[in-house]
Image (cartoon, grey):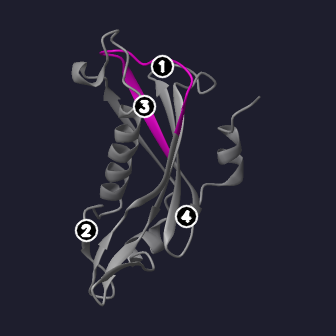
Amino acid sequence: MTYEFRLRRRVEFYETDMAGIVHFANFFKYMETCEHAFARSLGTIVHPGENDHGGVVGWPRVHAECDYRRPLKYDEEFEIHLLVREKKDKAIHYDFHFWKVGEQADRPLARGKLVVVSVGHINGEVKAIPMPAIYAEKLTVAPSEILARYEVKA
């Protein structure tokens, strides 16, 4: 069973503002990029495809958030750590943790969350449907001790 995924990348010039700091909106793009890489690691893709019911499946975001702790700058290498927080019949809750490569987990750059819902075309309408078997069979929720390790401490 799979509950985590890590992706490394480097900040590109076009992702930064005039001060050379990553624009906040790019963290949402980074989360989505990591989610797509995670899906590929499971042997599937996020782009709509055929589901078990013969309808087209997609994964719209129904919740997205990000808390920023420290700046990330041009040309810095960083890691995105995805954890599956919750798995429901029709939805997946992801946590994302960002660090500069080589730094400790207690110095995060940012923390984010995405909730995605499996949808399909049923009788001409887009409706929530049970997630495809490739996700349902392979995904598991991260153990509570791992999730607790990354909780925000006051």
Residue that numbered label 2 is attached to? 48
Say which amino acid is labelled 3: Glu
How would you rate the neighbour count of disc 2 (Cα within 10 Å): few for under 14, some for 14-19, many for 20 or more? Answer: some
Residue that numbered label 3 is attached to? 79
Estimate the spatial distance between the alpha carbons at disc 3 and disc 4, rounded to whole Å. Answer: 22 Å
Residue that numbered label 4 is attached to? 140
Q: What residue is drawn where x is 30% and y is 61%?
A: 46
In the image, residue 74 above or below residue 3: above
Q: Are marks 4 and 1 in contact (CB under 8 Å)?
A: no
Relative placement, left or right, of 114 versus 74 is: right
Label located before the other in sequence (1 or 3) = 3
Whole-percent x, y for residue 59 in the image? 37, 64
Label located before the other in sequence (4 or 1) = 1
Estimate the spatial distance between the alpha carbons at disc 4 and disc 1, rounded to whole Å. Answer: 28 Å
Say which amino acid is labelled 1: Gly
Say which amino acid is labelled 4: Thr
Label located before the other in sequence (2 or 1) = 2
How would you rate the neighbour count of disc 1 (Cα within 10 Å): few for under 14, some for 14-19, many for 20 or more? Answer: few
In the image, residue 45 above or below residue 10: below
Q: Are marks 3 and 4 in contact (CB under 8 Å)?
A: no
- Callout 2: SS: loop
